[in-house]
Image (spheres, coloured by chain):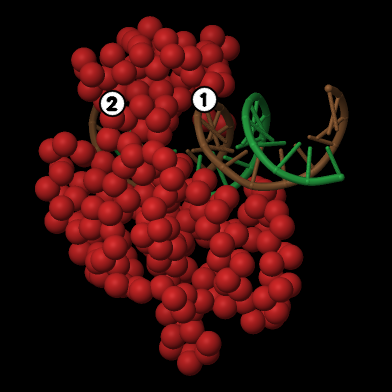
Chain colours: A red, B brown, C green
Amino acid sequence: MRKPCCDKRDNNKGAWSKQEDQKLIDYIQKHGEGSWRTLPQAAGLLRCGKSCRLRWINYLRPDLKRGNFAEDEEDLIIKLHALLGNRWSLIAGRLPGRTDNEVKNYWNSHLRRKLQKMGIDPNNHRLNQNLPRSQTLNTSGSTSSSSLKTNATPADKSSKSACEHHEVFNAENDSGDIPCGLPDLNLDLTISVPSSSLTKVEEEEERNPYASKVARDVKSAESPTLLLFA
DNA sequence: AAACCCGCCAACCGCCCACCA
DNA sequence: ATGGTGGGCGGTTGGCGGGTT
């Protein structure tokens, strides 16, 4: 059993107070990100380093957009999920100002249901042929984590999952079956992106290291279709 | 008005991977 | 080659607020 990243007994848990937020912001503005394990002590926070990192990345970062997702952002998430599966960090990287956590939550609470209403299986983006659409509406009932557990692609954790996911996606086209369940989606991923081109993202490298990291990740991803992004 | 239900989302957990000594 | 460490990721949990009964 791996030892915990920090001594949990002395750490705060749960919601962050404004004072804690301010301490974290002040520290990072002074010293920059990184060294998350030692940061809490240095910043005078009774928090786990990982907790600090999450708080900064998902909530305190100055370049976060927050607020409702625009329609083009929704479309892009759906398209990217069809290609990448549950690789939220990669998906979020194509949405400037959005975090993987935010995208993941939005997918699970909104988009998953939206696809189901369209008669599309959100797990593989196939048209749901077994059930009439009215029935698929009924099965959409729970978006709870338990339902995700049973439906989730087992291999989703590894990078392999994107390939497998993608293979399903391609197999549909190859087999001449009813193609993938994205009849209304324009798969040209070079458009409709809020900060559309990768080049633009790269231009922001100085200001936004996250964007550049993801640009590299996407470029290096295995799936040939991902060349669409490059 | 109160109890209950449900969805959202911030935060946590555990695993994996890259890096380094 | 190997073990330890830090960082990152996806899955899951639980509190809270709004809606419904």
Q: Quadrant of residue A100?
A: top left
Residue at 54%, 9% in the rendered image: A10
Horizontal arrangement in the rendering, residue A39 relative to residue A120 (left or right): left
For the residue pair B1 and A67, the one nearer the viewer reads as B1
Packing grade of label 2 (10 A; few <14, some 14-19, many >=20) is: few
Residue at the disc numbered 2: A34
Q: Earlier in the sequence, mark 1 or mark 2?
A: 1
* Left or right: residue A59 compared with residue A154: left
Q: Is residue C8 above or below residue A38?
A: below
- Residue A209, how many percent across, how many down? 21, 39
Q: Give coordinates of residue A111: x percent, y percent.
A: 52, 58
Q: Is residue A44 left or right of residue A115?
A: left
Viewer can see residue A38: no
The chain holding disc 2 is A
Which SS class for mark 2? loop
Q: Chain of mark 1?
A: A
- Residue at horizontal 60%, vertical 59%? A113
Q: Amino acid at mark 1?
A: Lys
Query: Which numbered circle lies on residue A192?
Result: none
The quadrant of the image that shows the N terminus of chain A is: top right
The three-letter code of the residue at mark 2 reads Gly
User: In terms of secondary structure, where does tag 1 sit?
Assistant: loop
Position of residue B19 measured from the top left corner of the image (x, y, whole percent): 24, 38
- From where the camera sits, is residue A96 visible? yes
Q: Nearer the viewer, residue C5 or A62?
A: A62
The residue beneath circle 1 is A3
Q: Residue at x 48, y 90 (%)?
A: A175
Q: CA distance from mark 1 to mark 2?
A: 20 Å
Residue A165 vs residue A230: left or right? right
